[in-house]
Image (spheres, rainbow, N blue to C red):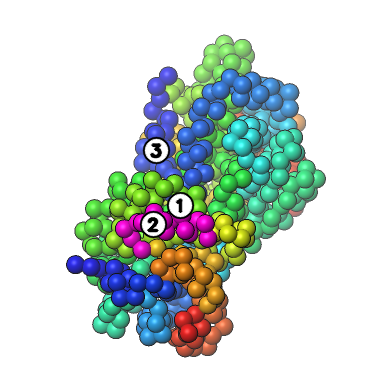
Amino acid sequence: MQNRIQQAFARKGQNLLNVYFTAGYPSLHDTVPLIEALTEAGADLIEIGMPFSDPLADGPVIQQSSSVALANGMSLYVLFEQLREIRTKVPDTPLLLMGYLNPIMQFGMEKFCQAAAEAGVDGLILPDLPLVEYEEQYQPIFKKYGLQPVFLITPQTAPARIRHMDTLTDAFLYLVSGPGTTGGANTQAEGVQEAYFERIAAMNLRNPRLIGFGIGDKSSFQHAASHAHGAIIGSAFIRALEDAPDAPAAAKRFVASILN
Amino acid sequence: MTSNFQPNARGYYGEFGGAFIPEMLYPNVEELREQYLTILADPEFQAEYQLLLRDYVGRPTPLFEAKRLSARYNTRIYLKREDLCHTGAHKVNNTVGQILLAKRLGKTRIIAETGAGQHGVATATVCALMGMECIVYMGKTDTERQKPNVERMRLLGAKVVAVTSGSQTLKDATNEAIRDWIGNPVDTHYIIGSVVGPHPYPDLVARLQSIISEEMRKQLLEKVGRELPDYVVACVGGGSNAAGAFYHFLDEPSVQLVAVEAAGHGIHSGHSAATSVLGTPGIIHGSRTLLMQDEHGQITEPYSISAGLDYPGIGPLHAYLGASGRARFISIEDEQALTAVAECSRLEGIIPALETAHALAALGQLGAGPDDVVVINLSGRGDKDLETYMKYADKLK
């Protein structure tokens, strides 16, 4: 049986839009309304950021949204409470939790996976969980609760390592568009990025590929999506929420600006 | 020599260590892990490193018998004079080694984090020496309380980036340096200044600082007729000078190792950096170690008067030394450290750095007897802290 992530890729095949937002931002209880609004507007997957005090892989925009979310009182306990009924409202859209290992370790990895599974979460993106630690320590727990790990690939990731990651998940592979943290501009010479995307495409991997980091508008989305199965937008969406009086309405406008 | 205190192949000291890094850093860290031991053991590298330590850093640094301090504490106190190293602290032992390593890895651009500025200055210094581009990340708060070091770095040709995220201190400077490395994965080497970060950094930095205890053993044999002292005392922020001072005594159980942390305004005041007491296991800057965090795993802001000890974690080696009972941890408050600054200045004519003063302030708590030999690692000199010392002049009388 296909999981929700695989179903989403089977339904659409290409140009999938994955939107990231930080739970608890702009205000504490925006989490569920934002998931509903993003789904309604046509987002194909949703990444819910679990805010952390020291997000090493993130640029200034997501750092700032994380600080605000923490100041608003967001925590894993609050987040799982908010997500308790989410699957009655949003039954089909894949939901992924994205965040750093330390808050999860304090919560307890097994307890975390259990709570995520109970809420109807499909996958986890934990950038500072290394592949070797995942395989040796956490893989059985992920499997027990039916959670898919999503691994990041960069231009420097060796092909054998990519193939290995591809065997460990039934979700998608997250292609980091180039060097840098989230929300940065593409500073690579023309053609370098495309060559990297095409090199990975030519590997004929089991899993579909989404491209993220530095994707922020319709043209960058379409460009990235043309080299993979779709793309991931985070920082640009957070910026769109920044001064919005009505976060769900801003979310709908934002998704429309990418897809229409 | 077999040792219980060397990390395993994955960089673990007991349950502490490892390399919890995003994929973006994996190739860099893996390259370093695969090569560091080979490069460090290479005779050509060693020849170049030892020559620079001697002629550029000024090693060996003296082991000085502090007679008036000894009389004051009724024990035999020796000061390992790392403050006499070029640039004024032990930090340069590491940067000299890492810049040579970076050259062998073909890197052309160097980044570093700094708290008190000593590691930043030591990095800027070796970059000038080798003609390499140098960017130093420093918390904005620290750029203000350690101004002379900011100016020194600039004079040496480094670019100093004042970090405004988080608490604007060492933790945040380290975050920004890591983010820079994520953005520059091919040409850049990150010279971490302490025994923190993902494997192999804690072991790499400990090895490069181990020259301190290597010299101590020879000098003690000469001066007191035995290689092993009864106590070795060092301050711990991340823990690089302590790692260097302890290194060749780790497997000598008769030597008491004493790590001194900053208690700030008091351990339970809410303004402290005493990680061994207040910390719990977690992940900071790519390493599983003890760190100060809240119940939700958010890293909390440490406090110390000393910018070099103002860090919410400790190196995984030190977490293990504490957990295994090999080292004893003592916490010293701001005021006690200031008293020790005055004492060392007046009794020995040596103005210590604020960080080092924490180690000196522990002298009264050691329980050392009249025949015991106590070695204090005098990790840095106090010139950089003059502004703070002027501010607290009334406490230094």
**Crowding near pointer 1: few (<14 within 10 Å), some, many (20+)?**
many
Amino acid tagged 1: Glu
Q: Nearer the viewer, mark 1 or mark 3?
A: 1
Q: CA distance from mark 2 to mark 3?
A: 20 Å
Q: Nearer the viewer, mark 2 or mark 3?
A: 2
- Between B263 and B95, the residue placed more toward the observer is B95
- Residue A204 magenta-highlighted: yes
Q: Secondary structure at mark 3?
A: loop
Q: Which corner quadrant holds the N terminus of chain B? A: top left
Q: Please state the horizontal and vertical placement of residue B157, each as a whole percent of the image.
A: 77, 45
Amino acid tagged 2: Phe
Name the chain under label 1: B
- Which label sits on residue B10? 3
Q: Residue at x 59, y 16 (%)?
A: B218
Q: Which residues are magenta?
A: A194-208
Q: Please state the horizontal and vertical placement of residue B372, each as a whole percent of the image.
A: 53, 21
Marked residue nearer the N-terminal end (1 or 3): 3
Amino acid tagged 3: Arg
**Crowding near pointer 3: few (<14 within 10 Å), some, many (20+)?**
some
Task: Check disc 2 and report the residue beneath it.
Answer: A151
Please indicate, yes or no, whether residue B198 appears anywhere in the rendered image: yes
- Which label sits on residue B23? 1
Q: Secondary structure at mark 2?
A: loop
- Between B347 and B281, the residue placed more toward the observer is B281
CB contact under 8 Å: marks 2 and 1: yes
